[in-house]
């Protein structure tokens, strides 16, 4: 990388009056392949390089970026960022202080993403398509594969110098199955940080085909259930979307402070709610960027803050919020390394990484055995949540009736509508199992899609109404 141009940008920002500055130099190479019903429809090979400068002037932040490394273009960006900060109005409290860090993190690859050609990647996708079609011919199959290498260098006026290279492989599928009376659609994502070995292990194909067979069972045999109160056991797939949406997003410091209200939503939490109980003692929700191989992996965030595990809910009580340096300063705390941008052209904002429900002390069998009348939610077809993340709705896809401690007949699309506090306050047991699944989290304006993992343990809730 051209480290000298980053030094130039940092020094110029300080010379022109910035009290603080950070520079992010980034090169991203991405190969994308799209296949629809077994036919390769699109492929693209892109390289995006550039630099961003974020600075503080008169206690206000300014940001600018350019996909050019010419000094005159960078100087123009710095002047624009200073002008932005100067015209921003009243001071907002600045940013939280951070010690200097030096780090070099190169994610290892067993099979280098650059050693795998387009034919092999398309052949892999075609194998998935063929296997799904063999299970259920009357189907529509859309597959998208993204293989990315991201090289990043962060330099701050506090003395931080942080280099990282992160290879990432993600496969998305949208599969629609249709019978004469029913149809079902499954969207899911597979992948993480590392080389092509993420896909070559064969686990992904087995997971997809097993999921499709279950959905076929729902279409052919699923029974409608009557409205009423039951117990529910959730798989890690449901755990993931529930923790991500009802704990992760409302815990973001910028949402708590109201900054995100007009862009991506509000939060039912306020900065005074630390220590407030929202669930039972069995509920512990964490967000941890440092999990190796995870889709949301990083060791330092885009403001140069060292990443760590954040325990958002501890024994049912709000324990901490996700913070960048700006929100942390406004709340009088330290940043916990939650500042991310999806590319150098975007300002880093408060984001999740890998959000999950921590395991408990029950086996999955014990969760089920403790239910006389209930439902096992393994997969979902639809989810909705309100703007403040206080009320939510989940429509089951792979779901079965539980009777007297046994999983029995399949059910067709049971619906759970419940408040966030009502859901977490109904948890009486959490499983020992632990699974994480990749996803792409959207937030910001312009929108920023950020790679994350979500999941955790299975868990059980008591006496809730399904329809």
Image (cartoon, rainbow, N blue to C red):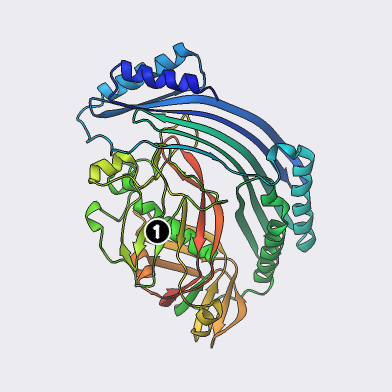
**Whether residue 359 is situated above or below residue 195 in the rendered picture:** below
**Whether residue 118 is situated above or below residue 315 in the rendered picture:** above
Viewer-side residue, 178 vs 261: 261
Q: Residue at x 47, y 69 (%)?
A: 359
Viewer-side residue, 365 vs 149: 149
Viewer-side residue, 170 vs 336: 336
**Whether residue 301 is situated above or below residue 68 in the rendered picture:** below
**Whether residue 123 is situated above or below residue 20 in the rendered picture:** below
> Mark 1 falls on what kind of element?
helix
Q: Is residue 277 left or right of residue 355?
A: left
Q: Residue at x 68, y 57 (%)?
A: 204
- Res. 281 image quadrant: bottom left
Q: Position of residue 137 (x, y in %)?
A: 78, 59
Q: Which residue is mark 1?
A: 246
User: In which quadrant is the N terminus drawn?
Assistant: top right
Q: Is residue 84 visible?
A: yes
């Amino acid at each position: 990388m051209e480290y000298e141009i980053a030094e130039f940008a940092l020094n110029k920002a300080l010379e022109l009056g910035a009290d603080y500055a950070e520079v992010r130099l980034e090169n991203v190479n991405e190969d994308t392949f799209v296949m629809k019903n077994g036919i390769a429809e699109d492929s693209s090979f892109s390289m995006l390089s550039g630099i961003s400068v974020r600075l503080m002037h008169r206690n206000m932040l300014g940001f600018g970026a350019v996909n050019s490394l010419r000094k005159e273009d960078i100087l123009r960006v710095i002047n624009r960022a200073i002008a932005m900060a100067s015209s921003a109005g009243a001071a907002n409290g600045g940013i939280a202080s951070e010690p200097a860090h030096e780090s070099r993190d190169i994610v290892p690859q067993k099979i280098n993403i650059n050693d795998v050609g387009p034919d092999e990647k398309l052949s892999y996708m075609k194998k998935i398509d063929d296997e799904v079609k063999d299970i259920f011919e009357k189907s529509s199959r859309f597959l998208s594969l993204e293989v990315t290498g991201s090289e990043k260098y962060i330099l701050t006026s506090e003395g931080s110098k942080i280099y990282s290279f992160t290879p990432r492989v993600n496969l998305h599928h949208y599969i629609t199955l249709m019978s004469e009376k029913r149809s079902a659609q499954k969207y899911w994502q597979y992948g993480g940080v590392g080389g092509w070995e993420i896909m070559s292990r064969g686990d992904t194909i087995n997971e997809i085909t097993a999921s499709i067979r279950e959905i076929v069972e729902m279409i052919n045999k699923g029974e409608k259930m009557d409205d009423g109160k039951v117990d529910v056991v959730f798989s890690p797939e449901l755990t993931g979307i529930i923790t991500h949406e009802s704990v992760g997003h409302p815990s973001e410091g910028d949402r708590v402070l109201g900054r995100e209200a007009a862009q991506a939503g509000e939060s039912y939490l306020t900065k005074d709610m630390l220590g407030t109980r929202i669930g039972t003692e069995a509920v512990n929700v964490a967000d941890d960027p440092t999990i190796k191989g995870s889709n949301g992996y990083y060791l330092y965030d885009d403001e140069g803050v060292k990443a760590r595990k954040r325990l958002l809910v501890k024994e049912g009580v709000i324990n901490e919020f996700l913070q960048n340096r700006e929100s942390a300063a406004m709340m009088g705390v330290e940043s916990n390394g939650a500042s991310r941008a999806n590319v150098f052209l975007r300002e880093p904002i408060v984001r999740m990484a890998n959000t999950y429900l921590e395991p408990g002390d029950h086996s999955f069998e014990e969760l089920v055995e403790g239910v006389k009348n209930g439902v096992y939610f393994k997969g979902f077809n639809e989810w909705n949540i309100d703007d403040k993340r206080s009320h939510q709705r989940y429509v089951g896809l792979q779901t079965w009736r539980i009777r007297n401690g046994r999983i029995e007949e399949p059910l067709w699309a049971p619906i759970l509508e419940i408040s966030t506090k009502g859901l977490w306050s109904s948890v009486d047991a959490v499983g020992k199992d632990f699974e994480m699944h990749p996803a792409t989290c959207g937030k910001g304006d312009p929108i920023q899609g950020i790679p994350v993992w979500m999941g955790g343990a299975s868990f059980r809730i008591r006496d809730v109404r399904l329809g």
